[in-house]
Amino acid sequence: MGSAIEIPTKVLVNTKEQVKMPVIGMGSAPDFTCKKDTKEAIIEAIKQGYRHFDTAAAYGSEQALGEALKQACQLGLVTREDLFVTSKLWITQNHPHLVVPALQKSLKTLQLEYLDLYLIHWPLSSQPGKFSFPIDVADLLPFDVKGVWESMEECLKLGLTKAIGVSNFSVKKLQNLLSVATVLPAVNQVEMNLAWQQKKLREYCNENGIVLTAYSPLRKGASRGANEVMENDMLKEIADAHGKSIAQISLRWLYEQGITFVPKSYDKDRMNQNLQIFDWSLTKEDHQKIDQIKQNRLIPGPTKPSLNDLWDDEI
C-alpha cells in the first residue's frame, strides 16, 4: 500500500477564507448504511489519503460517516481540520425557516461542530414532513430561491458551515440564484461524466467562480442499460494505451477540466485506483476522441413523474 497519497486541492474562490477542497472525495450513496463495513471503508479511505467526504441528509449515511470520522480522529489518523465534509439540504426542508434547523440536525447526526460545505440538494421544494423518494409531483411547492439562499447565508454567519453551494442547478437556475445572492455559491454538484460532459454549465461556472463537483463520475448509480462510459471500446483503447483503467481515464479527464468529483466506492482496491490519477496526463488526441462521445443525461431527477423543466433542457 505504501503511504497515503497527497490529494491536490481546489480553492473555493467564492468563500471568504478561500477554503480548499480536495479534488477527489468519497461519495456516499443512499445504499450506504450503518453497517460495520461502512465505517471500515471510511477508515481505510482516510488511511489511503482521502480527506473529503460527501453525504446528505437524504442518504441516511450521516450517522455512519460521523461515527467513522470521530473514530479516525480518536485514532490520531486525522484532525477535524484535515477533513472536508459536505452535506446537503433535502427538498422537504428547502424552505427559508427550515434551513438552519436542518443543518443543525445534520451536524448533530454527524457529531460535528461545523461543515466545510452545505449544499441545496435540488432546486425544488416540497411539503415539509416525512422523507420519501422519489417525491410525488403533487407534493411540490414553489421554491423560494431568495429566502432559502438568505438562510444558507445565515448558516455561514452562524459558523455552521465554511462554504455554501448548490446541487443539480442548471445555468438558468444559477442565473436566478446569482441575481438574488449576496454570497455567491462556492460549488454546484451535478451529474458529470464522459457521456454527460455539460460544456455549457462548465463555461458558466468557470465565469462565475463556481467550482463544479461531479457525482456519478463513472456513470454508475443507475441500472438502466449499458454503461456508455465503462463499456466504451474507444475508452478501453485509451485506457490500455496509458496502462490505466477506464475509471482512471474518466477521473483524469474531470481533473484536467478543473472539476472535483465524488466517486462512490467502498472497495479497498478501487478506492486506491481512483487516487492513481495525478502523475500522468491525457494526450490532445485523447481529448479529441473523448469530445466525440455521444451525450445523454443519466439521472432524470428526484420526482415521479419526471419534471419537464427541471434541467431547462441544457446540454
Image (cartoon, rainbow, N blue to C red):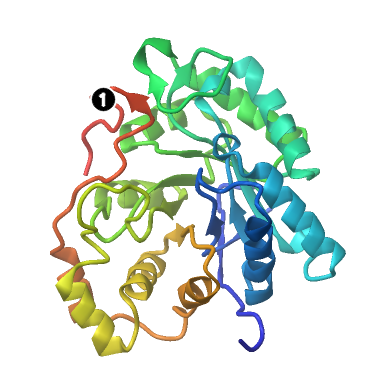
Q: Is residue 36 visible?
A: yes
Residue 100, by quadrant, is top right
| Residue on which the image places disc 1 | 309
Q: x%, y% of residue 241? A: 24, 88
Q: Which quarter of the image is occupied by the N terminus?
A: bottom right
Give me the residue at 19% from left, 81% from top: 237
Q: Is residue 248 left or right of residue 31?
A: left
Q: Which quarter of the image is occupied by the C terminus?
A: top left
Give me the residue at 22% from left, 67% from top: 231
Q: x%, y% of residue 110? A: 73, 43
Q: Is residue 52 left or right of residue 202?
A: right
Q: Is residue 123 left or right of residue 283?
A: right
Of helix, strand and loop, which one carries label 1? loop
Residue 244, by quadrant, is bottom left
Mark 1 nearby-residue class (10 Å; few <14, some 14–19, many ≥20): few
Q: Is residue 283 visible?
A: no
Which amino acid type is marked by label 1? Asp
Using the image, determine if residue 33 lies above or below residue 234.
Answer: above
Q: x%, y% of residue 193? A: 31, 58
